[in-house]
Amino acid sequence: MITLTDTQTIDVPVQSGEEDRYHLKMGPQHPATHGVLRVDLDLDGETILTCDPKVGYLHRGFEKLAEHRTYAQNIVLTDRLDYIAAMSNNVGYCEAVERLLAIEVPERARMLRVMVCEMSRISSHLLWLATHALDIGAMTVFLYCFREREVLLELFAELCGARLTTTYTRLGGVRQDVTRSIMKKLDKFVEDFPACIEEYETLIDTNRIWLKRTIGIGQVSAEKALDLCLTGASLRGSGVDYDIRKHMPYAGYEKFEFDIPVGETGDTYARYRCRMEELRQSNFILRQCIDMLPPGPVLGKDAPDLVMPIRAANKLEVDVPAKNALITLIEDRDVFMEGDIYVATEVPKGELGFYFISDGMGRPYRMHIRSPSFIHIGALSTMAQGAMIADLIAIIGTLDVVLGECDR
Amino acid sequence: MEQLGIAEQLREKFPGSILEIITHRGQVTLLVDRKDIFAICQVLKTDHQMNHLNCLCGVDNLKRTAAHLERFEVVYQFYSIDNRTSLRIKAQIPESDPSIDSITSLWTGANWLERETYDLLGIVFNNHPKLERILTAEDWEGYPLRKDYALRGDKEWKGLEELREKAIRLRQYDFYGAQTEQE
């Protein structure tokens, strides 16, 4: 048994020239890494020399799994990607499959999709602001943000029975129509929310610590951001005007009036400003949704028959057209056209793309998920190089990553 | 259509390596040979302002048959933010030598996407700065997204038994025994 007195030290062999280096493994349980992310750091004092993010702790093999399930069954998997904005993932998946299989979506369902997308954008941005501020040291914002987020999650629960894993969309529409009670509550939320955003801003906008820890931290130029394949607010903070809702409109976004906030400096503060402005724009879109929601069905006529009540009503009818039938797991038969498609949607984190190859069967031959979080964490090592270790926390926060989506 | 125009220009520039131009649901796909893939991507980036790399993934074509289709392919999806056009490139890779040139020097963001393709499909990217497994464990056997890799295998991951033994050993650790020894 060795006991050390105050004067004794242990000799650890260190290569010459690396005496000041310190190797630190941050994570996977570190609360500031937003999930199971491990970052291997080489430090010189507090300065980061190299930063090597390690992912895969949450890998569930969705891409492999999807090849063995029907298109409709895969909607459930998309909830588990970005679990704080599951609605956006549902919409992204269904938009892609519908374009691949040429399924028409009724107008009301399209607008409901826009509505739930924007609701989930607000709820995701609120969670981002809450945790980002908490990481940097502003505790109060966390509680304020969760107050409003709770209202939205309650609305989701009323709409589809789940707060987080929603599975709200169906191929060719949505699961259920909105009720009057939901619209009334949403109307009240939209009315109150702008005042809430101002509340958050009074808490941190003039806070000296907040400004010192965000301005000039994690700065990325526009060229560098494009080189790193950043998307979403992380790219727009650097001054590139790229939002898929405007560039490649889906679900009827072209009918809405809204602006795309674009930053200039490309630092953590610019991205913070972009997302705060996006909250206002999302609220504005929600207002338009409430005013413009057209009447009609919420599920298309040529949608694969998957909603249970409709199936039960038509149980005895035999001559269902082939395309309209529920595609079984056991039988492999040609129901669709062969071909491939890439459809991207703008989720709160950035660009969520689905790449499908169909070989004509009821199941996707290949499904690739282009998840923004995976690429953003890939950019971490470039962005964190030369920064202080405390700034790494701010950079992870500002990229707004979710590990469920990263590891798939 | 602007996409087809770009495709035709590429065909003129690389006559030998553009195998086919396919249009499906308004999206244009170029089937190309793997040998010129770096040059094609470079031309797209510099001459056609395709500054955004949407997506990069691998496909196993074991159960598909079509003209020019090899065992593997790598799919690149490009988008030009200024011109608002997109283009998809599919590079064909034979089974005998599953390797292709890396485009990491054109887009740093391709680094992790290529690593993922290597991890799940076993396609080797030449000149890649750090080609290691990323989503699966370092000692994983096989490439999960290949079509001949079963969804559910007949045996567990070989590290699992080791972990189980370690957990059992740790559970038996006697805290008080260690103290009494010292005394």
Image (cartoon, grey):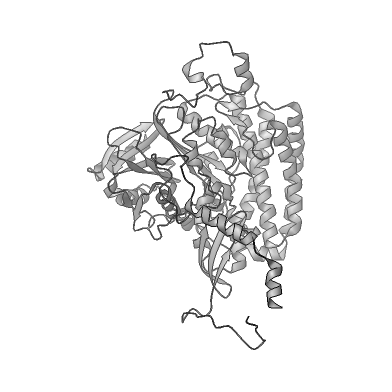
B183 in relation to A340, above or below: below
Count the numbered circles shown: 0
Residue A264 visible:
no
Q: Residue at x 71, y 78 (%)?
A: B183
Task: Indicate the position of residue B129 as horizontal and vertical percent values.
Answer: 39, 61
The quarter of the picture where the N terminus of chain A appears is bottom right
Q: Residue at x 30, y 44 (%)?
A: B95
Residue A136 visible:
yes
Query: In terms of depth relative to the viewer, which is nearer, A154 or B81?
Result: A154
A405 relative position to B60: left or right: right
Instruction: Give the residue at the far left of this rendering.
Output: B16
B23 relative position to A300: left or right: left
Asked where in the image residue A287 lies, by quadrant, the reply is: top right
Query: In terms of depth relative to the viewer, which is nearer, A50 or B103?
Result: A50
Task: Indicate the position of residue A145 as horizontal and vertical percent values.
Answer: 73, 49
Asked where in the image residue B15 lies, by quadrant, the reply is: top left
Task: Indicate the position of residue B33 as horizontal and vertical percent values.
Answer: 27, 44
Task: Indicate the position of residue A49 as horizontal and vertical percent values.
Answer: 51, 70
Query: In terms of depth relative to the viewer, which is nearer, A110 or A303?
Result: A303
B10 relative position to A350: left or right: left
Q: Residue at x 69, y 30 (%)?
A: A291
